[in-house]
């Protein structure tokens, strides 16, 4: 089946957990200087906005960086972590409801040579797109893409009819959000069990 760009309505639904689960198996595509790189999404984390202590928008916090989270769903939110890693998130729900989904891992599909060049790797091992920092590096995504519409030609998410057994979908607490107290234990991380590109717990 040919790749088909996800419609804005996919991202604008109320339940961010449902959207996160349904992103598994979809394809993240970037196009830079005419070169396409793409990978299948195999691990994500959902963030529930103002009520979620792990979210950048917890308590209604708004900064120049996070303002894009309050946009209508279907745009990218990319932020810099530790001053090094560009992390790609999908903004969901309607305007003023700052839900977002972090893409943690991809299985490469297209543009492998370009991904290797961007990451400085010689061989296409599982670390190429394992972990959110590597995802953005391999696909050439940076903070300059924050606010981009996921309907653009440069950055979008598509489906191609790929299906996986529902028993392969697993959930767990999110990674690296210990500061969020009880919210750190919520099972808002979703992944495809057994996929070698998954960055954290994989059973």
Image (cartoon, rainbow, N blue to C red):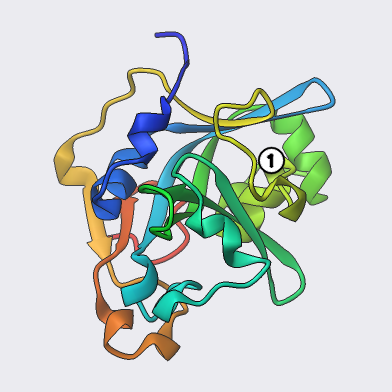
- Say what secondary structure mark 1 lies in: helix
The x, y position of residue 13, in whole percent, is 28, 42
The residue depicted at 24 percent of the width and 68 percent of the height is 187
Question: Where is the N terminus found, in terms of image quarters?
Answer: top left
> Please, is residue 33 above or below residue 11 in the view?
above
Q: Residue at x 33, y 18 (%)?
A: 161
The picture quadrant where one finds residue 109 is top right
Q: Residue at x 55, y 27 (%)?
A: 151
Pick whichever, 46 or 164, lies toward us: 46
Q: Position of residue 56 (x, y in %)?
A: 50, 73
Percent coordinates x, y for residue 166 in the rendering: 16, 40
Residue at the disc numbered 1:
139
In the picture, the quarter occupied by the C terminus is: bottom left
Which is nearer the eye, 63 or 148? 63
Q: Is residue 171 shown to the viewer in this render?
A: yes
CA neighbours of label 1 inside 10 A, class few (<14), some (14 to 19), many (20+):
many
**Left or right of 142, for residue 43:** left
In the image, farthest residue toward the left: 167
Vertically, is 151 above or below 161?
A: below
Residue 54 visible at all: no
How many numbered markers are drawn?
1
Q: Is 26 situated above or below 35?
A: below
Farthest residue in the top direction?
1
Q: Quadrant of residue 84?
A: bottom right
Q: Nearer the viewer, residue 169 or 101?
A: 101
Left of 14 or right of it: where is 9?
Answer: right
């Amino acid at each position: 089946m040919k790749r088909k760009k996800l419609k804005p309505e996919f991202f604008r639904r109320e339940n961010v957990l449902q959207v996160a689960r349904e992103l598994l198996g979809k394809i993240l595509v970037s196009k830079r200087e005419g070169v396409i790189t793409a990978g299948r999404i195999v691990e994500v984390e959902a963030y529930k906005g103002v009520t979620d202590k792990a979210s950048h928008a917890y308590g209604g916090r708004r900064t120049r960086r996070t303002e894009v989270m309050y946009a209508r769903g279907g745009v990218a939110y990319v932020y810099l972590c530790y001053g090094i890693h560009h992390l790609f998130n999908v903004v969901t729900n309607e305007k003023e409801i700052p839900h977002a989904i972090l893409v943690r891992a991809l299985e490469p599909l297209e543009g492998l040579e370009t991904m290797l060049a961007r990451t400085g790797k010689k061989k296409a091992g599982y670390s190429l797109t394992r972990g959110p920092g590597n995802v953005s590096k391999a696909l050439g995504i940076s903070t300059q893409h924050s606010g981009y519409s996921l309907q653009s030609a440069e950055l979008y998410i598509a489906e191609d009819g790929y299906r996986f057994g529902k028993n392969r979908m697993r959930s767990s607490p999110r990674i690296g959000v210990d500061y969020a107290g009880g919210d750190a234990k919520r099972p808002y991380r979703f992944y495809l069990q057994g996929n070698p590109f998954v960055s954290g717990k994989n059973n």
